[in-house]
Image (tube, helix red, strand yellow):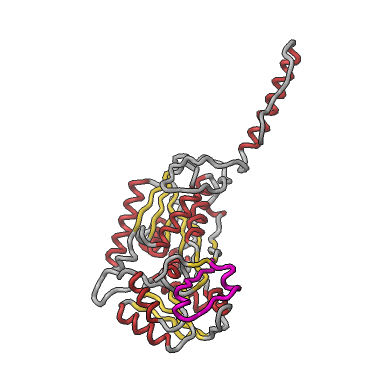
Amino acid sequence: MTGDLRIAYQSSNWRSLKHSRVVYCLLAILLIQVFAGCGEEVPQKSSVRGASTRSDCPTATQPVQGKRVLLVHSYHPEYPWVGAITRGVENALQGSDINLEIFYMDTKRKTDEQWRERAGELAVRKVDQFNPDVVIAVDDNAQQYFATKYVGSSLPIIFCGVNADPSKYGYPASNVTGIIERPHFNGTVEYINELLPVHRIAILSSDDPTSLAAHSFMKQEYHDFEVVEFRLEGEFDMWKNAVRELCNEVDALGIYMYHTIKADGSKESLDPAEVMKWTVDNATVPTLGFFDFGIEDGLMMGIVESGEEHGMKAAHYALEVLKGTPLSSLPTVKANVGIRMMNPSTAAKLGIELNAKVSSSTRFAGRTF
């Protein structure tokens, strides 16, 4: 509404004063109805750390000020997927005055079973200390080693970034719902076919639970091209051999994950940028990626998933629960945003020229080698 509301009235007698009071009451009711909706800006002041933009107004009914949300990441804060999901969560909670805390299980750099179990125990300890009203658990390791301990409890759990069938973790449950992650497999192959014909492909990934689950989904998805092989490797020397072998057999090589590749005998994962630089330098066919960080690191092109979408959807579910919406009314859903992305430097190395159809709707990577 714009302008000042002005009421002209006469106060010379009781009747006119009484009439004015009635008018004021009616106007007050009208103003309450207007400002109770979501048509106005959400206040920018927030207790959410690092939030930068506002979200749409929450639609539920109970106040959320002072409520506590714990965001449990499977991985470490420097991992780009983690950063994207965190931004989505913070943006969705902006203006809510919710107390958000983040816990990182760090199971991408430290991959041995003993550490995963320990990381899950530390996440449980964080719950005991922070006493959250809602937990957002991100990626499969956070489910397997942490969130499954609360299935059937009174603590609401919202998951996102889950590659496996949720039933593996006992989801959905009375207190659990969330967002499933699926690679844009067919879409990525259709995308590269706008640039050059691809009939035979292979998918290579690091040997980790996320990749195993994603490969399982890709195998079930219908496609009208030949998949020569789905291969998982854990050691760098074996990874190098796989890249050389597969490039001799296919028109394009898809890379899903490369973040848990290790030097022989090491328990610590290599710098993924190092793994990808070698891959891009030695691949003789176009490379396909399924995440924006993969294209940024040098993979040629792909329809990539949006971590921010996962974070936004999970946080909106958390807001609904905090506002009093029954969790059972919030269905498990699949993230559906796909972003067309390309690394022009990699395409140029392979002598591939972009056409107008591909370029017009593509986001280009900013990091090159």
Exactly how many numbered labels are in the figure?
Answer: 0
Judged from this view, the residue extending furthest toward the left is 265
Does residue 222 appear in the picture of this structure? no
Quarter-wise, where is residue 337 in the image? bottom right
Query: Which residue is at the front of the view, 347 or 48?
Result: 347
Quadrant for the N terminus, please: top right
Q: Is residue 83 left or right of residue 194?
A: left
Q: Position of residue 172 (x, y in %)?
A: 50, 61
Q: Position of residue 353 (x, y in %)?
A: 53, 78
Query: Which residue is at the front of the view, 305 or 220?
Result: 305
Q: Is residue 287 left or right of residue 16?
A: left
Judged from this view, the residue extending furthest toward the bottom is 248
Q: Which residues are magenta?
A: 339-362
Query: Which residue is at the front of the view, 338 or 28?
Result: 338
- Would you say residue 358 sits in the magenta stretch? yes
Quarter-wise, where is residue 168 in the image? bottom left
Up-down relation of residue 226 to residue 117 (above or below): below
Residue sitting at 36 percent across and 60 percent down? 78
Quadrant for the C terminus, please: bottom left
- Would you say residue 95 sits in the magenta stretch? no
Query: Which residue is at the front of the view, 99 or 141?
Result: 99
Q: Position of residue 278 (x, y in %)?
A: 35, 77
Does residue 243 appear in the picture of this structure? yes
Q: Is residue 4 left or right of residue 270?
A: right
